Amino acid sequence: MVDEASISSLKGLVDSAGSDYAEIRISEIDKTIFSLRGDSVETVSSGISLAGSVRIFDRGNWTFVSFNSIDDVRNHLLRAKELSSKLPAQKKGIKKQAKPVSIRKKSSPVIDCTGITTEEKFALCNEYNNILKGSPRVQTTRTMYRDAKSRDIYVNSEGSDMYYEKLHCGVSLSAIAKEGNEIQTYQESFAGYGGFELVNNRHAEAEKVIAVALELLEAQPIEGGKYSVITDPRLTGVFIHEAFGHLSEADFVYENNRMKDLMKLGTVFGPQFLNVVDDGSIEDAVGYIPLDDEGVEPRKNYLIKNGELCGRLHSRETAGLMNEELTGNARAISAMAQPIVRMTNTYIDNGKNTKDELFEAIGDGVYAVNAFGGQTNLEMFTFSSAYGRIIKDGKPGKMVKNVMLSGNVFDTLKNIRMAANDMQLFGGLGGCGKGGQGPLPVSFGGPHLLIDNVLIGGNQ
């Protein structure tokens, strides 16, 4: 069993590794998952898993060994040392040092999921699923529940150690409505570090899911063209995470000469009121981390401040290679995966206007709500909004569908005319994917934004 008492012996191991640097990560997770699809039970899963790894930095090389038993960690460390000795020394190998810290942290759920019976959890999922099935035009539904109680240990040879016990709980609700050849989907997800209180009493949200899916059946496709657009906080967050956040991950910048030119610090990317932040220290957000997976404390990192590019996200290696400060953004999907540069809680900060002032200022345009995926290619992006509403004389009206926004992220940032003061952060049961590691828990968000000259695909 993983517990705080294990730290002392693990610290002795890394201290005796005989390497320039050594670290050990161990995680034990007790997880429960239910998934219902239509009238069927799709998944029922419960169990405990253990994962761990050792990583050393020696003579300019990183060496990594993973395991799923803590009975013989010493030999895993020796194996990493043996593998490292077979590698030629690297003159350009650089690892940034961090100050030593000692952290003991536990999340504080209002209702601990371990005190809720399996029958009660399943019954709640069934209630939500029955709401989603509440129309003959609903073809199928999907309701997923997941809770995971984890105990994480981290130690390194710089003197840092951490014991972190957390409970993550969430539910995802989706409905697929059909009439004739028309099929429409809507989904909501709610999750975070807490307990059963995060998923309980979500009946109103289930009602909203089916209502939006049915309304989409009646909605007309939007006419393609350039519009002034107001994005809701969720779409704002998906945009800044996908279209800009990944460009700010230093491993991507360092390995791409074109991005080095485009992402030069000091470049003006937007209006003076534009501030973009990644902050892993926000404790009530899904992307919170007490330490990153290299033992570096998270912090509030401004990526854009007053419209100007001023920072990027780093691991120890990229910070050393680029001679920049550590940011606490080396993360791994599990203790058996190697840390890579990842976002935490990424958002556009509040502006000075109210939401109503944005609608007054836009006159005519489109209100784009939520996001249903998309893709990026360097600075180019395409996102599908869950739905839109046509704005006439500053008032949102009829729903439209097939609202696909595309463009160049740098042009789009410069075209932000106003930002509201209603910033929100969102998480869920999903997460971010990169390098084969996903879904990693992250939060994204921002305020309502008014953006000009947005290209929207649709009927021509």
Image (cartoon, rainbow, N blue to C red):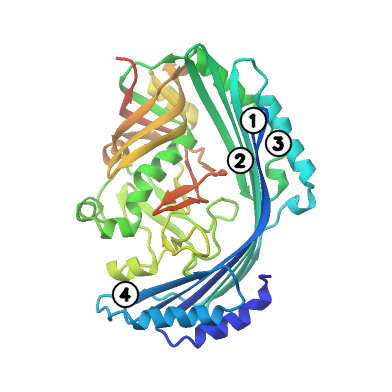
Residue placed at 31% from the left, 28% from the top? 454
Q: Position of residue 74 (x, y in %)?
A: 54, 82
Q: Is residue 119 left or right of residue 101?
A: right
| Chain-order first, disc 2 or disc 1 | 2
Q: Position of residue 357 (x, y in %)?
A: 45, 27
- Please state which amino acid type lies under the numbered disc 1: Glu
| Chain-order first, disc 3 or disc 2 | 3
- Mark 4, secondary structure of its residue: loop
Nearer the observer, 278 or 317 = 317
- Mark 1, secondary structure of its residue: helix
User: From mark 1 to mark 4, how far is it between C-alphas?
Assistant: 49 Å
- Please state which amino acid type lies under the numbered disc 4: Ile
Q: Which mark is residue 404?
A: none
| Chain-order first, disc 3 or disc 4 | 4
Residue placed at 29% from the left, 69% from the top? 321
Nearer the observer, 114 or 354 = 114
Q: Which mark is residue 125?
A: 3
| Chain-order first, disc 1 or disc 4 | 4
- Please state which amino acid type lies under the numbered disc 3: Cys
User: From mark 1 to mark 3, how far is it between C-alphas?
Assistant: 13 Å
User: From mark 2 to mark 1, how far is it between C-alphas?
Assistant: 10 Å
